Image (cartoon, rainbow, N blue to C red):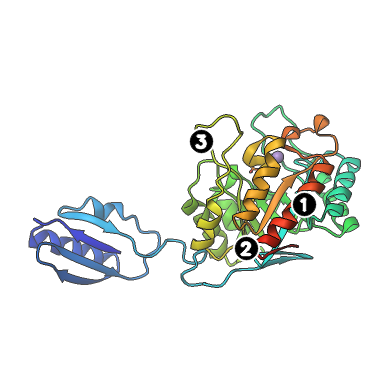
Amino acid sequence: MVIVMEDNATESMIIAVSERLEKFGFQVHRVNGVNRTILGAIGDKRGIDIRGFELAEGVHEVLRITEPYKLAGRTFHPENTVVTVKDAVLGSEKITVMAGPCSIESEQQLFHIAREVRTAGAKILRGGAFKPRTSPYSFQGLGVEGLKLLKQAGEEFGLATISEVMEISQVNLMLDYVDIFQVGARNMQNFSLLRELGKIKKPVMIKRGMAATIEELLMAAEYVMAGGNYNVILCERGIRTFENYTRNTLDISAIPVTHKLSHLPIIADPSHGTGLRDKVGPMARAAVAAGADGLMIEVHHEPEQALSDGAQSLYPQQFLRLMEELRMIAWAIGRELN
Ligand code: PEP
Ligand code: MN
């Protein structure tokens, strides 16, 4: 980092800041300008709180020159990370679609939807077994029974599977049933859960928290990667804004911003991003046009009867048509639907 001292900073103030930097393990390079002194602090001190230096006497400004996400960032890893799961790849020129119900409700429901999304071209089957519901009285998911059905449906239709892990105690249990572990928006900063997922080998998809900055999302990925698991996928699923016509505001610009900052694949979830079925198609198309490496879309054959998120679930016919449109958009930007 670089510390710019005030014009009127005294020699003793400059020395105090230099000594403090050295105490933190930095090598200090001092540059005396005509009016100002600049201290260049050299050293890889991750996680340092720069505010302490901003408050030091005589300091004008503190500038961080490298990003705090060393493993997730592009600086030391310029080429894209490609996460491969069964037939699905995320992070290459191919665009992969994950689809399925919000919640796994029954064998009949899951198998019906799995067949439909596979026919339309999805490569990964989604379905929640442990559901993070706002109300404790809402359907909480089928738990392990749901995971068993997800695994069976994945095998039956040749689809990889993804499901949300809500707590550390579910990690080992889920290893037998899912191909990708989903960390939900509400758990994006559950650091102990992220650390635990750093110990496994299976891919982890982290959804952006409802009020999380892109840097915070990348730091969540850093937690998993710091544990040794580099198979991380990011997911833009909409953030809270003052806008109420949609459930969330899908931040399409997060896609190119993240691609520039990080080598990790990023997908978009227009279902949770908008909360309304008629907005899902337009935002899915926009996300692919903006460079998303994949999509996660909720589909239900009887959304009126769905136990969660029926209003944002596409009918299978709508999903089929959307996939055709996405194929053309992918082609227009030199990519291909997986
Ligand atoms: C989900 O994908 O089922 C879900 C609960 O999403 P989010 O964490 O983005 O709200
Ligand atoms: Mn949902």
For disc 3, the marked residue is: 241
Query: Is residue 152 at least partly visible in the picture?
Result: yes
Locate residue 160: give its quadrant.
bottom right
Nearest to N terminus: mark 3 or mark 2:
2
Secondary structure of the residue carrying tag 3 is loop
Disc 2 residue type?
Lys
Disc 1 residue type?
Met
Closer to the camera, 128 or 242?
Answer: 242
Closer to the camera, 69 or 74?
Answer: 74
Task: Give neighbour class at mark 2: few <14, some 14-19, many 20+ (Cα, 10 Å).
Answer: some
Question: Residue 47: image x %, image y %?
Answer: 40, 59
Task: Give neighbour class at mark 3: few <14, some 14-19, many 20+ (Cα, 10 Å).
Answer: few
Cβ–Cβ below 8 Å for labels 3 and 2? no
Q: Residue at x 51, y 66 (%)?
A: 71
Q: In this view, does 144 lie to the left or right of 54?
A: right
Foreground mark, 3 or 1, reads 1
* Screen quadrant of the C terminus: bottom right
Locate residue 26: give its quadrant.
bottom left
For disc 1, the marked residue is: 323
Secondary structure of the residue carrying tag 1 is helix
Cβ–Cβ below 8 Å for labels 1 and 2? no
Question: Residue 175: image x %, image y %?
Answer: 74, 58
Secondary structure of the residue carrying tag 2 is loop
Q: Quadrant holding ligand 1?
A: top right
* Screen quadrant of the N terminus: bottom left
Task: Give neighbour class at mark 1: few <14, some 14-19, many 20+ (Cα, 10 Å).
Answer: many
Nearest to N terminus: mark 1 or mark 2:
2
For disc 2, the marked residue is: 199
Cα gap from disc 1 to disc 2, whole angstroms: 35 Å
